[in-house]
Image: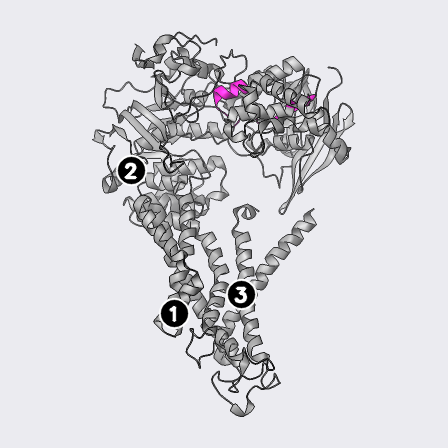
Amino acid sequence: MPASRLRRRLRRYGLAWAGGAIVAGWILVAIFAPWIAPFPPEAQDIANRLAAPSAQHWLGTDILGRDVLSRLIYGSRVSLLAGFSVVLIGAAFGTAVGIIAAWLRGWGEEALMRFTDLVLCFPPIILALALAAALGIGTTNTIIAMLVVWWPKFARLARSLAIVQRSQEYVEAATVVGLPQRRILTRHVLPNTFGPIAVLCTLDLGIAILTFAGLSFLGLGVVPPTPEWGSMIAEGRELVEQWWVATFPGIAILSVVVGFNFLGDGLRDWLDPKAASR
Amino acid sequence: MSAPVLDVRGLVTVFHTDAGPVRAVDGVSFAVGKGETLGIVGESGSGKSVTAQSLMRLLDPPARIEGGEVLFEGRDVLTMSRRQLTAWRGAGAAMVFQDSLTGLNPVIRILRQVTEHVVAHGRMDRRAARRHGIDLLRRMGVASPERAAASYPHQFSGGMRQRVMIGIGMANDPKLLIADEPTTALDVTIQAQILDLLGNLNEKFGTAIVLISHDLGVIGTICQRIVVMYAGEVVEEGPTAAVLEDPRHPYAWALANAVPRLDSPVAERLPGIEGAPPDPLAMPAGCRFMPRCPWRLSRCGAERPPLVEVAPGRLARCWVTADGRRLPPRTEPLHAKPPQPSTREPLLVARDLVKHFPLPKKTFFGTREVVHAVNGVSLHVMPGERLGIVGESGCGKSTLARLVTRLHRPDAGDIRFDGQDIATLNGEALRRLRPRLQMVFQDPYASLNPRMRVGDILAEPLLVHGRAASPAEAAGRIASLLELVGLNPAWAARFPHEFSGGQRQRISIARALALEPSLIVADEPVSALDVNVQAQVLNLMLDLRERMGLAYLFIAHDLAVVRAFCDRVAVMYLGRIVEEAPARELFAHPAHPYTVSLLSAVPEPGRQRIVLGGEPPSTLRLPQGCAFRARCPVAQRVCAEPPPLTEIAPGHRVLCHAPGSLKGAA
């Protein structure tokens, strides 16, 4: 039944394209925030506080009369920056640890991986929460706290991928032609572990953004006047009548997480060796 | 011939791929008589397995059978309903697959898998089925069938699993058994056992057999007639001996002559046919073999030849032989220069090499089990010499290759390369040695980094060892390397997946040659290739030796290939070399009982076989005394003592108490 296969493929990659579009849209919004936002994000208008969505304030205003849409637009900058820096730095560090562990074998591997397990055995959010609280409020400190809990899963994944690679014949072939160890690791092992790590990164970006928003919601993320989605929800959480204050940042977070998930799923299918053989 | 059991007429099977329809089976017709054995031979992609699956109607979309008839005793299998099919499969015709590991369900005991069919068809109750199943296993030659019946597949070796698979196929006494490459994954001695079993089934029970294989030798040992397939078509059909001796289609000619045989001259070039099969998406309008055919006529490109009778009982699809002409006999190939008897120092000397691999402990307090891979191997290779190492899987030959190239460090023993002790070398000193000692690997798909361009793969060793100062300088060297191994220099910009298996193996060879080594260790370099491609790669390796004075340590399980390629041969069994001699001497006067039976097990038509019982013992616990004792047909009491290494002729050494006591029947 070729028709059903076509439909399945369309649905699979259709979702990936939709996810990609959402993510690309948010990245553009973040970059061009000053030009898109109708109001400065921190401009207060007490007289017009908690105004419902209208032609002037499309998404209404919050408790201090600030434009929700403008804060949403500026908030994307903090969220995306936090998400990308946590995942990319975490992935780079974790992958390095994993690959080195797989290559060392013996005691070096044991030491590195047991240390990884040690970090993994704390619930990540709670550990990040404790660290962020200890380091003090602020975007950078929160990112550092998240990094500490973020790298171990990349170390685990990279190690298992590298163990598969190290017994491949082309790695033996590289040894036989006399390449230095470091070059074998960077030119042969690393590029062949790249696919699954890229997939995990993409899927993780949504989660990282969600976690950062969660920490901000609890008051640990950004310093107050700075617009951020999690803290915007926190400000609106008791306003039942004025639903727009908390709802729109919530939708923003949802859309980013869903977007990265679709993109990651599509990437996984696309990188799947079985699907890649056409 | 009475009414055929199976009559296939104009079968067409099409794969609807994204790139377009591929006619994998394109108008195939043949018939199998009652109790007949028919072989279908062809290289990978010729459509032979798809034909078998079409006969059983086992194909799923995107494959579709789009034409023809498959008449089984007069009933058309292609029009059967699902229910009729289920009843017919197993009772009418049954199939045995290549991979006995995935062909059996790992979580169901053997007995249930064997009797499932009988019970499902309501032929017998459970108790009768149990007796039937055990009886069946006994008939298949499964040792202690009662115990085997209660076991799981993983407790069996490959050969035993294949017997069980055949048992499942035979459970309902089918009239026809289709075996798709049933012995390809097995060692020679085990292969001989399975082929014997199939021959017996045919003789004793009159089961008709369709045997599918890429190996003409396998087909020749048990089949009365052969169908040769190429690019989805039948190109030749006839009695086995006639097709092998006097092929009438150029492709069949290439197949019959490209195979190294035990009775052909030692160390010579093989006549192979260059080129690759046509792109299935763009078949040539005329003869599909035309682009590769050395005897093509002008007519061949324009008109597709029909399958016509070229001699009584023989069909061929070729314009050249359509009027009953024969193809020229194989031209006597140029003999490779015999190795100059060298008084020089040996290039490589290994003495008493030992390598054991400890396994992970099963339980915390358990004792650690150890795989005894290599147990005291001594060998030497002279400059420019080709030493062959032969043995079955698990005999330690690949580990030996990795010890010699120092991918592994030996537990004991020493290795001297060009006078230098390299057994314990490491770090920078070992890297400096690498350029002179290169390796070609078995799997052409795994030995090239899939994410690097061919040019970069070849440039890497040059740059790292300072043989080229810059990538630009390396590019010139790479172009000449690619040319040397018979590839287009412009292909340096391509990725490995754009090449066929044979071409990839050429790239591997080019990589090994980049640093101008003096010794190449080749670990089964042609075992993953089709026979025709195998001949091309072996010829290339021969050429390179003559041009560059290379020495080879050539590791293989295929005796005929080793004979065709090597000056001297060593036979390994359980991590030891049991016999070592110049190739001519070894194949003419094998002295160790294992060598004798190994030689006799090579599937070639008309060969008297000594079928070894049993399988190689486990490498976890080495036997006392002679390692071969348990399977040796002429074992004596003295064999419980370790055998001495005796030199019975110049350069011919045997590890045996009674060398020459088992006579080959060949």
Q: Where is residue A71 in the image (x, y as percent from the top left)?
A: 50, 79
* Corner quadrant of residue A248: bottom right
**Image disc number at residue A257:** 3
Give, as a single range, the part of the protein colored magenta.
Answer: B170-194
Q: Label 3 amino acid?
A: Val
Q: Mark 3 lies on which chain?
A: A
Query: Based on the displayed image, in which of its 4 quarters is residue B568 positioned?
Result: top left
Reply yes or no: does residue B169 show up in magenta. no
Specify whether residue B320 is in view. Answer: no
Q: Earlier in the sequence, mark 1 or mark 3?
A: 1
Q: Is residue B172 above or below residue B586?
A: below
Query: Closest to the observer: A75 or B263?
Result: A75
Q: Given the image, what chain letter belongs to the residue carrying mark 2?
A: B
Q: Residue B652 location, x and y as percent?
A: 32, 13
Q: Of circles 2 and 3, which is in front?
A: 3
Q: Residue at x 40, y 16 (%)?
A: B628
Q: Provide the secondary structure element on which disc 2 rests.
A: helix
Of the two numbered discs 2 and 1 in the rendering, the one whose residue sits closer to the viewer: 1
Check the image and name the residue furthest to the bottom.
A47
Please report, as a chain letter, where disc 1 is located. A
In the image, what residue occupies the spot 57% across and 47% down?
Answer: A278
Which disc number belongs to residue A132? Answer: 1
Give, as a three-letter code, the residue at label 2: Arg
Residue A113 can be seen, yes or no = yes
Q: Is mark 3 on a helix, strand or loop?
A: helix
Q: Name the residue carrying label 2.
A: B434
